[in-house]
Image (cartoon, helix red, strand yellow):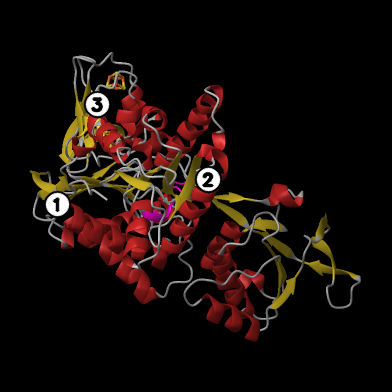
Amino acid sequence: MNQANTDMQKIEIASNVLVFGGGLTGIRTADAIAAQGYPVLLVEPGEAIGLTAEPRPLNGYSPTEMDILNNLVKQVRASKDIEVLEQTSLARAAGVAGDYKVWLSGKEKLAEKHVGAIVVASEFTREPLNGAYGLEISDAVITQSDLEQALDSDSKKFTNKTVAFMVGFGQSGNPLVMERVLRSALELTQVEGSSVYIYVNDIKVAAEQLERLYLETRDKGALFFKLLKAPAISSQEGGVSITYNDPVILKDVTIQADIVVIEEALQANCANSQLADTLRLDLGSGGFLQTDNVHRFPVATNREGIFVVGGSRQARALDQASMDAENAALQIRELLGDGTKMVPANKAVLDTGKCTFCLTCYRCCPHGAIYWSTDNKPIISPIACQGCGICASECPMDAIQIGEFSDTTIHEQVNSSMADKGKAPKIVAFCCQNSALEAAQMAEDFGIALPKGLRLIQVPCAGKIDLDYILNAFVEGADGVLVMACHPGNCKSEHGNTYAQWRVNDAQRRVSDAGLDKARLRFETLASNMASDFARIVAEFETRLKNLTGN
Ligand code: SF4
Ligand code: SF4
């Protein structure tokens, strides 16, 4: 197997950071980044940074912990390494990791800033779910936020009251929702004469200290009822009536409560979709700013140099959001380092003479590495380009080539691999260098026997496998072609495997039209450690080709 050059080269970059969002996560992130020695611009669209921008319940924190949080806000305001801009929004952004330009819209004018990295720390929001229970909010039907406020102002108003919580029937269980319920329920158990009932679909305690909080709440007298179906609740004079099917006695039971507390959904901030547009981020499920891709965890996005922390990536408790802040600071140190960056030597190069300015490359680049210049030309950033080759394969004019993975080089590799006129079926396997190629290498290292007619062609990403490569391999004499990509959700360039699958589907139609069995072309996904699966797939494919060709 001929391995292509994977050399890197050094480029100078900007080394200050924009943190967007001034809740406690944003503040912690700004502080952690400044502690690494990088100047920070902390931007909050609301009135002020700090606790006012905070959606998490803070009633569970001790006075000491609240002092620590308040001091952190003061410390950030006083820091000479952190510039705070309030009532300021992000109007536009362009550029790439190490070289972002952002336009901030403040009280007076639009300001242009140059930063090396961006952290989004927008907070999640809370939405009452009374509609899911068919209830109107009233004195007897309150939300979790209403209860927290009431407990903060005067918990004695719950003296001799029966309070029932509804959790997990209006949405699937969530540890942060559970934590809020448990903290409030525990506080209520300390109020004289109170009774606490918790009706729950699924007790979610998979978070630090949550199991302990659950046991403590139960030990202090709160009663838990785990039900498959939400109880029927009806308002009545001075309270509510709650009817549920008891899972132990298997009978309907009705109790009276003074107050029922309805859970709240923790939702993505509605500003996220605008932020996603501005920053060219993929939106994840529920409108949060991180897709479900293993390469993005814990705080990365589809854009290199843009990170998401806390409530911008999912509804997270304060300690989890603090971990995100530390993770973002570490990743920024890794990214910005000493103000220089190593980038792949094999990257996209544009021949403007061939370009017809169709915008295809700009739209398909998963790393946002392509700009559109003011005179309407694509510009490929050498800092952000990861050399995946998706743009090169999608360009209708073949105006983009990728270093040592140029079309000419790959065609030559395929052609020369066909020179051997042995009897074994000739198999051309286009292998993503991040997965299938490593699996193949491992199979060879383990001494696993592979088909004699197998020829491996390295590509930087399966998204680089052009339709022409596949068809040319058949024209040059291949008996079969394998296209081997990363598993879904595991592509470093997000959709490279999807592009490859589409091209294989297209090629199968054309191969069929040309009178060949489309089973001669196969698409597979693999992880880099799947050496035996690689060997199994190529062996099965060889057998299939022998049956088809009679060789
Ligand atoms: S895809 Fe090709 S032709 Fe279209 S703008 Fe990009 S380089 Fe130009
Ligand atoms: S090679 Fe990949 S990262 Fe580079 S410009 Fe093309 S699509 Fe973007």
Asked whether 96 falls inside the magenta stretch, the response is no
Ligand 2 sits in quadrant: top left
The CA distance from mark 1 to mark 3 is: 37 Å
Q: Nearer the viewer, residue 418 or 336?
A: 418
Mark 2 residue element: helix
Q: Which mark is residue 400?
A: 3
Mark 3 residue element: strand
Amino acid type at image mark 2: Lys
Question: Residue lying farthest right?
Answer: 251
Q: Which residues are magenta?
A: 286-295
> Which residue was labeled with disc 1?
39
| Observer able to see residue 286 | no
Asked whether 290 falls inside the magenta stretch, the response is yes
Mark toward the start of the polypeptide (1 vs 2): 1
The CA distance from mark 2 to mark 3 is: 38 Å
Which label lies toward us, 2 or 3? Answer: 2
- Residue 226 placement, left or right of 334: right
Q: Is residue 133 above or below residue 413?
A: below
- Residue 481 placement, left or right of 389: right
User: Is mark 1 in CB contact (under 8 Å) with mark 3?
Assistant: no
Query: Residue 225 occupies which quadrant of the picture?
Result: bottom right
Crowding around mark 2 (Cα neighbors within 10 Å: few <14, some 14 to 19, many 20+) is some
